[in-house]
Image: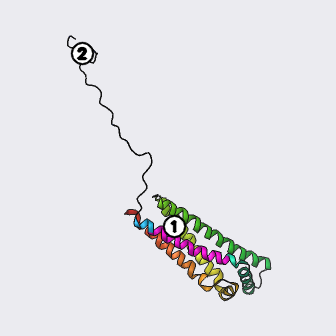
Amino acid sequence: MLNEPSDGSAGHDPPPRPRVQITPMRVDDPVRGRGTLVAVGLWAAAIVLIAATSVLVALHLDEIRVVLSLDLAREEPGATADEVVRAVNIAFGVGAVLVGVVVVAATYGCTRLWQGAGSGRGWLVVALIAAVAATVGEAIVVGPSSAAVVEAGLPVVFQWPVPAAGAAIGAVATVIAYVSADT
């Protein structure tokens, strides 16, 4: 006790200093690979093609509705006028919902993919399924009345080739999003 320092530390070393690290307060922007850029760009093109078809249908909706109703009434002579109108309205309603799902899911999926979140790819799959369903549905509904629908204002190229191209581009974009996820 004679050799103890006067401050009472009794020869102990001072405690170690804590490590201090200064880091930025915000998260770094995700690194976007070329695959992400290509996938988002292709999905943007797919949305434009599918939306262009929807806009053309909307511009000539009344004429197309009349043509489809008349053709359906000819094909199904036992159907009442209300049944024919209801069937055509259901077809248009389902198509509109599917196009809405395509636009919302693809936009959200691309946004999530751009932010670096893997969940974006799942949303792109949802958009792709809706795009394929809308394309097939349009071909089935409009196909038998194709010539009359052209006269009503919807060119043949927008009856199935443009929506099919949009769905195909969306499929390629979705595959690229999945393949580029590992790199």
Residue that extends furthest to the bottom in the rendered view of this protein: 147
What distance separates the C-alpha of mark 1 from that of mark 2?
Answer: 74 Å
Q: Which residue is mark 2?
A: 5
Judged left or right of residue 52, residue 115 is: left
Judged left or right of residue 100, residue 32 is: left
Task: Please provide the residue range marked out in magenta.
Answer: 38-57
Is the residue 61 above or below the residue 123 in the image? Answer: below
Secondary structure category for the residue under label 2: loop
Q: Would residue 7 be counted in the magenta stretch?
A: no
Judged left or right of residue 60, residue 180 is: left
Q: Position of residue 164 (x, y in %)?
A: 55, 78
Q: Would residue 43 be counted in the magenta stretch?
A: yes
Q: Which residue is mark 1?
A: 125
Q: Residue at x 56, y 82 (%)?
A: 161
Secondary structure category for the residue under label 1: helix
The residue mark sitting in front, 1 or 2, is: 2
Badge 1, how many Cα within 10 Å: few under 14, some, many 20+?
many
- Count the labels in the image: 2
Is the residue 33 above or below the residue 141 in the image? Answer: above
Residue that extends furthest to the top in the rendered view of this protein: 2
